Image (cartoon, rainbow, N blue to C red):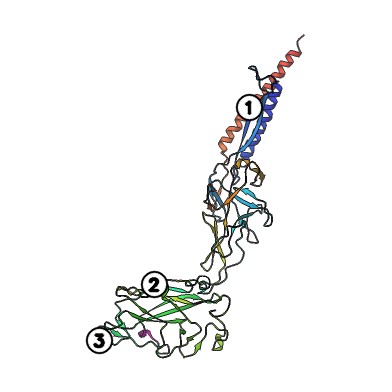
Amino acid sequence: MAFQQGLSGLNVYSRALDVISNNIANASTVGFKGSDAHFADVYAGALNGASSKQIGIGVSLMAVQQNFGQGNTSITGNALDMAINGNGFFRLQKSPEDQTGYYSRNGQFHVDKDGYIVNSNGCFLTGYGSTDGVHVNTASIVPLTVGTGGIVPQQTGWTEAVNPGQGGLTMEVNLDNRDHRSLATPLANSDWEQLVPFAWDNTFNSNMFNYSTSAAIYDQTGAEHILTNYYVRVGNDGTDLRSWHVYTVIDNQYLVGAGGTPPAPTTTLDFNPNGTLITSGVAARVPLDLSSTTMQDGTRVDLTSDTATPPDLAFRWFEQTAGTPPYAFHLNLGETTQFGMKSDNGKNTQDGYRAGSLTNLSVSQEGYVVGSYSNGQTKIMGQVALVEFTNPNGLQSAGNNLWIETYTSGQPTIGEPGSGTRGIVQSGHVEDSNVDLTQELVNMIIMQRNYQANAQTIKTQDQILQTLVNLR
């Protein structure tokens, strides 16, 4: 019987050395999970019950169990390299059409020639896609793609067609209440000065306004234009003390409106005694009719028409009343104040931008893949989905840092990073192998001694039998 016991020991500890060797071989494999050999004793079955003199007949390898403990993370600098800090797995597909799921902790990804996020074996990372660059569709799991093209331009005012009341340009301005220049005739013994009436012709000069602000806006091709507002105080310390006219000019050439002498203002701002705007917020949104502008020589120009005059302007800059969808250009001055401090343009916000090319990718802790473009815009490309198993030890290794589900592992549950115990995503990092190399070397010595000892039992049994054979 000692032969059988010794042989079982040789077989088991040889297998255990295989496990240790595989762990050591993968000590630098990203996302690798080390394994442990689990042993079980073997006894012969007894028909008449157990015996106090029962002797085992050896040892067997009961299981090779993987250790799914968290590994350390290393910085790579590649934004698409991802480490999971938690219990989740990346879900991969062999092709965009094949819905079979493969699971991995190896987060080394890059973009292929078609814009898909893939690993080194060409497997496709899956998650929630995005069609509008703002939201993700959590209804289905798809291979994530970042595209290979740029971002198309967006005209200022485009948001109006999607979210009415939000498109156009918003300017936050303070008009100095201490500015004692106005259109009104100064009162006797007053320190106020009278401005020259505003005129959009060759006589236009800085004595016609108190303050001006400028902001960039974009037409339907993404070309940049400059919108300038001229603020003119109407009254003095005797009347209309808190009233201002606003005149709007595009590209320092086109006054919005019919012109004339004096031209009609774009809007009039009236303030409360405390310097706040009487009609503020969204209510202060002013529609700008860019189909009616006037040059300084009196020429009328429609900036929204393909048949604009003069002939060198015969193309549509701003699409307002035609096209799909029509855009409404609004100027929002609802944040304007009249405080006793220097006139200032604090902030401008508008919803247009020029065309741009993709310059950078980043991944947030929640798994959002975000593209940054040369025009300063960002767009959500999609969101990485993480998978969780009730019994990850039931997963079957498929090679190439992949596992597949089994009946023992249970069905995968898919969710967003940060939900449940799936963990978060660390961009620019990878998870190292969780193999403790020092411990594995110690284990190798132990298994080697066990192997030698079992070989020695066989040798000893052989010597005993040889002695018995030599009896005469």
Q: Which residues are magenta?
A: 204-208
Q: Which mark is residue 187?
A: 3
Please, what is the three-letter code of the amino acid marked with disc 1? Asn
Circle count: 3
Q: CA distance from mark 1 to mark 3?
A: 110 Å
Question: Mark 1 or mark 2, which has the lower sequence index?
Answer: 2
Q: Does 263 appear above or below 145?
A: below
Direction from residue 11 to residue 297 in the image, left or right = left
Q: CA distance from mark 2 to mark 3?
A: 31 Å
User: What predominant SS class does the magenta segment belong to?
Assistant: helix
Res. 464 image quadrant:
top right
Q: Does 246 appear above or below 451?
A: below
Which mark is nearer the camera, 1 or 2? 2
Please, what is the three-letter code of the amino acid marked with disc 2? Glu
User: SS of the residue at dot 2?
Assistant: loop
| Mark 2 burial class by Cα count in 10 Å: few <14, some 14-19, many 20+ | some
Q: Residue farthest to the left?
A: 189
Q: CA distance from mark 1 to mark 2?
A: 81 Å
Residue 73: image location, x then y, percent: 53, 47
Q: Which quarter of the figure is the C terminus placed in? A: top right
Q: Is residue 376 magenta?
A: no
Residue wearing tag 1: 450
Q: Is residue 206 magenta?
A: yes
| Mark 3 burial class by Cα count in 10 Å: few <14, some 14-19, many 20+ | few
User: SS of the residue at dot 1?
Assistant: helix
Q: Residue farthest to the right?
A: 472
Q: Residue farthest to the front?
A: 48
Residue wearing tag 2: 335
User: SS of the residue at dot 3?
Assistant: loop
Q: Which quarter of the figure is the N terminus placed in? A: top right
Q: Does 95 appear above or below 446?
A: below
Direction from residue 459 to residue 390 in the image, left or right = left
